[in-house]
């Protein structure tokens, strides 16, 4: 039995179909997706624009409900859950990292992380200590009280990662985490996500177009026209994508 | 939290000791006030709207309460268990005269301890320098437990027992052409001297009260020796008010026997509602509330729209609708609180400035507390449109921004 087979499955999706829009202008965005995310793995979800990556990410993150199929998050089936039930599941088990960071501009770095903790009913001095520790963990010990407007893109994304980590979610979902960053900062953020994914109780899924990120992937899933077209584990298969990073593809 | 990334940069955070242990503002409150203060112009407009609303409602309501108080001022200063008034009397300031036999009939009624005459009548005041104005002459006995007038600042009530003497409020000097105690004028052609001056004893109408003795009032107004406008009735200990009232009513068919409270309310209802004055004041207060609601609703909605991405992010992070609603409500309450404090301070300043003018504006702790509740309620109500907006946020929009 391989390490992957032994690791916990944090997300299990079967036969996921998503239809968007109203008849007669309906679009079938996802056409039967089967996907499992394992703890301890950084999975990259890649595919052309309009292939359904973000829709799949939204469904895995319990933001959208599938039209058909079953989704289980941290062992909990989501079928039939109300909006608030899904919000509760997100709050307890999912951390998000967004392309545009989506930090609250009126709050400092530590307050942004505290906000995520507050949603989980962790507040007061404990929340401050946990949030500050999270920022130290992502290399921002010197920027704890900085306002987002005074931070670089890389720093903001690190704060977003610290916020996603707050409350120790089972799954981290990142939507184009390096798209708004230069090469150096993008690399640093991917390194960070790869380290976050080493936690044996957490799976990380990142949607990306950026081929420079391939070298950090434990698994690469490609999606095309609403279907998974390939899935590979380059590290296990002995493949190297370092050349992509150097070439800047 | 199990973040233990082995990064070189991730060195241990220097512990802040007791600093991080200090009591922290709840995040909902922090987010609310940061959102509010983020757009200062919008916040300023919100506060101006609330202040305007609070001041308008406070002043209009204060004038209404002041009017109520003013209308009933003499009734309150000369309380009685029962009032015997001419049939059809609309208010204290709408006098006609009783026939003259009432006092004796009342005194002979079982359960009555005391009956006092009070004369209220219109009079023509001729100013010393010429010109006339209408006044209300009020005459009471000196032996009453509740002598009129009150708040005498110069002269005395005893002085009014002398013939041809009257008391006026000093705020009426310009209206009556008087400048000081001892000045002389004419009422209905009779020469009178100012023997008492009061402070803040004004009538609700534009007609000044002229206080004098009961005898002088009868003489000035041409009433008969036993005639009065009203009879103030005090009951004997243990007497049943309704029985005495029924008995007096039976004996005096051309009168009405009403309680202190009924007389107050009848007078207030007449002046405030039959004349439309009260309705105008209430309409002004309601208008103030509407303006407040519209301004706060508009600015809160605009603020919510400005921060919609943050609310969508919160929703995506798993915030329940209740959490986001709490943030909006907190913004509304904070706006209301700040607006109220500024508004009530301004209103109190206006009320203080109006203290010795013809405008009687009243502010009581109860009114201040009610205004506070109304302001907060108004802001919460105004937050509804913003709340509807945020609870309908689709968190999926965070991926498209």
Image (cartoon, coloured by chain):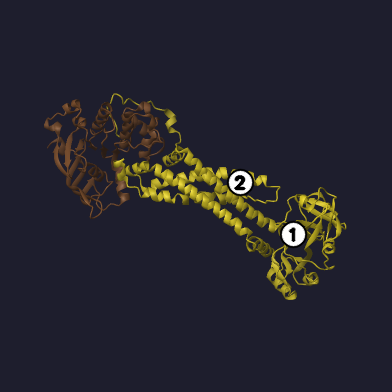
Residue at the image position 31 percent from the left and 31 percent from the top: A158
The N terminus of chain A - image quarter: top left
Residue B171's disc number: none
Earlier-in-chain disc, 1 versus 2: 1
Chain A tint as drawn: brown
Q: Mark 1 or mark 2, which is nearer to you?
A: 2
Q: Give the left or right position of residue B160, taking residue B14 as reference.
A: right
**Total tally of numbered discs in the picture:** 2
Viewer-closest of B371 and B261? B371
Q: Is residue A135 above or below residue B176?
A: above
Residue at the image position 39 percent from the left and 49 percent from the top: B389
Where residue B83 sits, quadrant-wise, is bottom right
Give me the chain that's yellow. B
**For numbered disc 2, what is the local secondary structure?**
helix
> On the image, numbered disc 1 is attached to which residue?
B78
Q: Is residue A109 above or below residue B117?
A: above
10 Å crowding of disc 1: few (<14), some (14-19), many (20+)? some
Q: Is residue B178 visible?
A: yes
- Chain under disc 2: B
Q: Position of residue B100 (x, y in %)?
A: 81, 70
> On the image, numbered disc 2 is attached to which residue?
B347
Q: Give the left or right position of residue B30, taking residue A170 as reference.
A: right
Viewer-closest of B244 and B17? B244
């Amino acid at each position: 039995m391989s390490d992957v087979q032994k690791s916990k499955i944090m997300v299990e999706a079967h036969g996921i179909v998503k239809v968007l829009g109203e008849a007669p202008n309906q679009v079938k965005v996802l056409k039967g997706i089967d996907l499992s995310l394992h703890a301890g793995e950084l999975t990259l979800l890649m595919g052309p624009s309009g292939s359904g990556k973000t829709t799949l990410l939204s469904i895995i993150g319990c933001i959208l409900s599938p039209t058909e199929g079953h989704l289980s998050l941290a062992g909990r089936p989501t079928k039939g859950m109300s909006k608030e039930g899904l919000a509760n599941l997100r709050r307890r088990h999912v951390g998000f990292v967004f392309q545009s960071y989506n930090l609250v501009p009126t709050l400092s770095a530590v307050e942004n992380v505290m906000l995520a903790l507050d949603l989980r009913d962790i507040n007061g001095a404990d929340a401050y200590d946990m949030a500050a520790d999270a920022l130290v963990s992502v290399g921002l010990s010197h920027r704890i009280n900085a306002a987002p407007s005074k931070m670089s893109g890389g720093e903001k994304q690190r704060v977003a990662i610290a916020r996603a980590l707050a409350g120790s979610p089972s799954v981290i979902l990142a939507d184009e985490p390096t798209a708004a960053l230069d090469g150096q900062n993008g690399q640093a953020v991917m390194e960070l996500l790869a380290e976050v994914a080493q936690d044996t109780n957490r799976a990380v899924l990142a949607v990306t177009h950026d081929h420079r990120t391939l070298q950090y992937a434990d698994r690469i899933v490609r999606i095309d026209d609403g279907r998974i077209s390939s899935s590979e584990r380059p590290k296990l298969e002995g493949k190297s994508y370092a050349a992509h990073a150097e070439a800047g593809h | 939290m199990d973040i233990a990334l082995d990064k070189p940069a991730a060195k241990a955070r220097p512990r802040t000791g007791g600093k991080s242990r200090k009591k922290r503002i709840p995040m909902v409150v922090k987010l609310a006030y940061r959102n509010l203060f983020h757009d200062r112009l919008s916040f300023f407009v919100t506060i101006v709207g609330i202040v305007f609303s609070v001041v308008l409602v406070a002043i209009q309501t204060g004038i209404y309460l002041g009017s109520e108080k003013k209308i009933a001022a003499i009734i309150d200063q000369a309380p009685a268990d029962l009032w015997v008034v001419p049939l059809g009397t609309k208010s204290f300031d709408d006098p006609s005269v009783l026939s003259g036999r009432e006092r004796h009939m009342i005194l002979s009624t079982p359960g009555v301890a005391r009956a006092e005459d009070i004369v209220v009548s219109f009079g023509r005041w001729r100013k010393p320098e010429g010109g006339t104005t209408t006044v209300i002459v009020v005459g009471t006995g000196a032996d009453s437990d509740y002598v009129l007038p009150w708040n005498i600042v110069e002269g005395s009530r005893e002085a009014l027992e002398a013939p041809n003497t009257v008391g006026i409020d000093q705020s009426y000097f310009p209206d009556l052409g008087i400048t000081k105690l001892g000045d002389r004028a004419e009422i209905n052609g009779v020469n009178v001297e100012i023997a008492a001056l009061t402070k803040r004893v004004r009538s609700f109408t534009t007609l000044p009260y002229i206080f004098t003795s009961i005898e002088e009032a009868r003489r000035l107004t041409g009433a008969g020796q036993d005639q009065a406008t009203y009879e103030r009735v005090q009951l004997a200990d243990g007497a049943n008010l309704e029985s005495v009232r029924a008995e007096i009513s039976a004996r005096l068919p051309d009168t009405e026997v009403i309680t202190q409270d009924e007389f107050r309310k009848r007078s207030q209802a007449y002046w405030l509602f039959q004349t439309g004055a009260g309705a105008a004041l209430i309409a002004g207060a309601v208008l103030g509330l509407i303006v407040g609601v519209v301004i706060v609703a508009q600015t809160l909605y605009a603020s919510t729209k400005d921060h919609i991405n943050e609310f969508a992010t919160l929703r995506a992070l798993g915030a329940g609708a209740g959490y986001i609603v709490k943030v909006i409500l907190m913004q509304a309450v904070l706006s209301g609180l700040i607006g109220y404090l500024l508004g009530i301070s301004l209103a109190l300043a206006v009320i203080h400035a109006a203290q010795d003018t013809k405008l009687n504006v009243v502010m009581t702790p109860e009114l201040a507390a009610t205004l506070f509740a109304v302001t907060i309620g108004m802001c919460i109500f105004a937050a509804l449109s913003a709340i509807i907006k945020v609870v309908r946020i689709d968190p999926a929009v965070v991926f498209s921004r």
